[in-house]
């Protein structure tokens, strides 16, 4: 091989070497996001945080001023079920349950609400959250209607004023119209027996 040929061969070999490329950042992005979410979840577990323990800014404060119309064409025992307003929360201990026909956990807790409606000294009221009247009627017609009054919150405005995180949620309001207790999420038999009812009894007794 002549000297010029050798030089050309060396140049070709150098040019043919693969170029190093940086690792694409976009490939790592989903992994970073996943790791962050996993870390947050682990952090909450480590601290033992429970969504039901999220404090409400409205506890020990008057219930929001509101007026909710009745669910259209909803009846109970042959009589129309009325809506309600903040004025209806005074003079008697009230339990206000936020529910919707499309809410699966609402169906799960419904038997406990039927039992709750039998407790002496309270009125059980419902806020029907972002629901269609026909769906609400079908829901209550199938499972039963434990509420004495139901307000239609089709826009979700009232739920925002009440500080609702999501359905279902249940509030206990004392005779003065003051929110005394809030249970976030669906009631289950254990929480209902060991947590909710004891709190309700204290409020009924004025403690």
Image: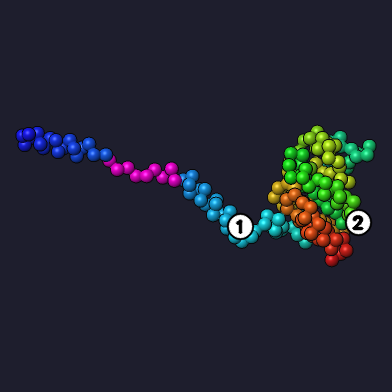
Tell me which segment is drawn in magenta. 19-28
- The label on residue 45 is 1
Provide residue 55's location: percent of width, then percent of height. 70, 59
Left or right: where 154 falls relative to 89: left
The residue drawn where x is 55% and y is 52% is 38
Which residue shows up at 90% across the image and 39% down it? 76
Left or right of 201? Residue 31 is left
Residue 84: percent from left, percent from top: 85, 46
**Figure quadrant of the N terminus:** top left
* Among the two numbered marks 1 and 2 on one chain, the one whose residue lies closer to the N terminus: 1
Work out which residue is located at the far right of the displayed protein and give it. 78
Place of residue 111 in the rendered image (x, y in percent of width and height, measured from the top left)? 83, 46
Residue 127 appears in view? no
In this rendering, would 66 be left or right of 75? left
Q: Which residue is rendered at x = 65% and y = 58% of the image?
A: 49
> Which residue is identified by label 2?
121
């Amino acid at each position: 091989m002549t000297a010029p040929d050798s030089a050309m061969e060396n140049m070709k070999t150098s040019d043919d070497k693969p170029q190093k490329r940086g690792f694409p950042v976009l490939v790592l992005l989903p992994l970073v996001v996943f790791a962050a979410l996993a870390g947050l979840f682990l952090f909450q577990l480590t601290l033992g945080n429970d969504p039901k323990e999220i404090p409400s800014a409205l506890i020990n404060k008057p219930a929001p001023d509101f007026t909710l119309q009745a669910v259209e064409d909803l009846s109970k025992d042959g009589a129309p079920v009325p809506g309600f307003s903040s004025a209806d929360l005074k003079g008697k201990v009230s339990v206000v349950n936020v529910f919707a026909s499309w809410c699966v956990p609402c169906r799960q807790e419904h038997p406990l609400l039927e039992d709750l409606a039998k407790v002496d000294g309270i009125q059980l009221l419902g806020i029907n959250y972002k629901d269609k009247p026909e769906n609400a009627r079908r829901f209550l017609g199938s499972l039963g209607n434990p509420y004495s009054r139901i307000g239609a919150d089709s826009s979700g405005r009232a739920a925002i004023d009440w500080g609702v995180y999501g359905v279902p949620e249940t509030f206990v309001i004392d005779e003065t119209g003051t929110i005394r207790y809030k249970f976030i999420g669906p009631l289950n038999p254990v929480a209902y027996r060991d947590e909710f009812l004891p709190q309700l009894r204290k409020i009924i007794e004025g403690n």
